[in-house]
Amino acid sequence: VEALGAQRYPGLALNVANSSGLARIKGGATVTLSGAGTRDVNLTAENTSDSTVIAKADSKVGGKVGIGASVGINISNNDTIAEVSDGVLLTGAHDLKLNATSDNTLTTTAKAGGAAGGSGGIGIGGAISLAVASNTTSVTIGTPRVAETLSVTGELAARATHKGVTNTLADGSASGAAAGIGIALGLNVVNDITTATTRRTLNAAGDLGSSFRNRSGFHQ
């Protein structure tokens, strides 16, 4: 039995990140605004995240077989929520403005190199880069306590905006006197949800509007 003198240099990088931005009037609360002043209600939730994973493995040997393998796994869960919850009784407000804004970036890199410099050497490099992102950005006006209308004397605005970027790189390089075998896999699994919703009747003396915007970019 001939010993090939194989050497393996595995590289594993794992990141699991959870972030949240929350602006909420708690369910069942009673909020009454009166007297002088603007009597405005502003609920603003912001969430900015940047999750980065780098996995590297290199094998350079003078023998017959050099093996380098790396795996990069990046998991990111981000929630950005502005809401008037179910059962809230809100009276006396002038403006009611809800804003949820998120900017989430996910970068995952896996690089592996296998090199065998010996006579008849075989180099093997394998890299797997996996990115899993779940981004929820929402603005919600929940159900009424009984069946009352939510009324304001000014503007009522609900806006949800999300920007997401996912960068994934897998690089498996290999060299050998006889052969070089390189394998690379980059995979993105992304679930982006952006909503602006109401579950009750609304009445505004001024402007009334809702909007949502979702911009997602993927690079492999």
Image: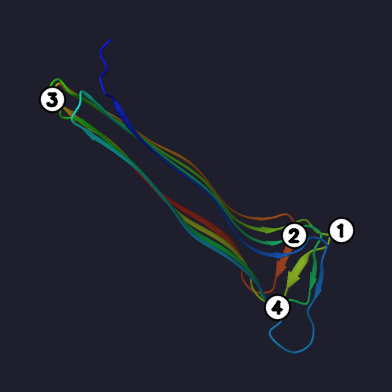
| Residue occupied by mark 3 | 177
The amino acid type of the residue labelled 2 equals Ser
Task: Kindly identify the residue that appears in the image at 70 percent across and 78 percent down.
Answer: 94
| Residue occupied by mark 2 | 85
Callout 2: 10 Å neighbours few (<14), some, many (20+)? some
Q: CB of mark 2 within 8 Å of CB of mark 4?
A: no
Instruction: Give the mark, 2 or 3, whose residue is nearer the N terminus.
Output: 2
Q: Nearer the viewer, mark 2 or mark 4?
A: 2
**Where is residue 179 shown, x and y percent of the image?**
17, 22
Instruction: Give the mark, 3 or 4, whose residue is nearer the N terminus.
Output: 4
The amino acid type of the residue labelled 3 equals Ala
Q: Is residue 169 visible?
A: no
Q: Which mark is residue 180?
A: none
Task: Kindly identify the residue that appears in the image at 75 percent across and 70 percent down.
Answer: 151
Identify which residue, 201 or 182, lies in the foreground: 182
The amino acid type of the residue labelled 4 equals His
SS at mark 3 in the image: loop
Q: CA distance from mark 1 to mark 4?
A: 22 Å
The amino acid type of the residue labelled 1 equals Val
Q: Nearer the viewer, mark 3 or mark 4?
A: 3
Q: CA distance from mark 2 to mark 1?
A: 13 Å
Callout 4: 10 Å neighbours few (<14), some, many (20+)? many
Q: CA distance from mark 3 to mark 4?
A: 77 Å
Image quarter in which the C terminus is found: top left
Instruction: Give the mark, 2 or 1, whose residue is nearer the N terminus.
Output: 2
Q: Which mark is residue 94?
A: 4
Query: Along the horizontal axis of the image, is 124 left or right of 62?
Result: right
| Residue occupied by mark 1 | 146
